[in-house]
Image (cartoon, helix red, strand yellow):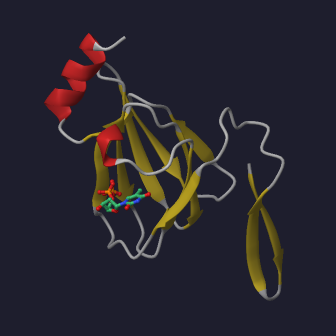
Amino acid sequence: MLRIGSNEKGYLSFLEGIKELSFIIKRVYFVYGVPENIVRGFHAHKITDQIVFCSFGKIEILLDDGINKQTYILDNPEKFLLIQKRIWHEMKWLTKDSVLTVVASEKYNEEDYIRDYQKFIHYINNNN
Ligand code: TYD
């Protein structure tokens, strides 16, 4: 999805004609300046779907639907992962200076977050 152009002056990555995208992008954000081995995230969203890329570096993403946990390595800007609503996610910076780029289906709203794992399990079991 994220494509790369490069020449002797460096790299330029771009998003264009995003046919894999199942939502309209309402927000884009970037996470960076994160020390190596730090894990961020530890939340799920009630409504928001997101697509994440590692636009520079190497980041491990853990997805957990409350039953199964799966980890993925993003180490190339052309790899991406859909993080759907109601999926607990954690992101580990495997190399410093890695940049996580996120496109989201909703504007930021703290009410959309579930930041406690037990509340996440309770939410997915009681809100169909
Ligand atoms: P947070 O969700 O805690 O980051 P992470 O899950 O990566 O550890 O977000 C950090 C702070 O930034 C928090 O105070 C919420 C705020 N924030 C916004 O204001 N707008 C946004 O679009 C996002 C993603 C976060």
Nearer the observer, 73 or 67: 67
Q: Position of residue 88 (x, y in %)?
A: 33, 35
Q: Is residue 77 left or right of 11 when viewed as pictured?
A: left
The image shows a total of numbered marks equal to 0
Q: Position of residue 112 (x, y in %)?
A: 35, 39
Q: Residue at x 65, y 36 (%)?
A: 23
Q: Is residue 67 left or right of 27 when viewed as pictured?
A: left
Nearer the observer, 74 or 40: 40
Q: Residue at x 19, y 20 (%)?
A: 122
Looking at the image, can residue 69 be seen? Answer: yes
Quarter of the rendered structure image containing ligand 1: bottom left
Q: Position of residue 117 (x, y in %)?
A: 19, 34
Q: Residue at x 56, y 54 (%)?
A: 27
Q: Is residue 52 left or right of 3 when viewed as pictured?
A: left
> Where 33 sits versus 43, above or below?
below
Quarter location, residue 22? top right
Q: Residue furthest bottom?
A: 9
Nearer the observer, 119 or 78: 119
Looking at the image, can residue 53 be seen? Answer: no
Q: Quadrant of the C terminus?
A: top left
> Where 48 sits versus 27, above or below?
above
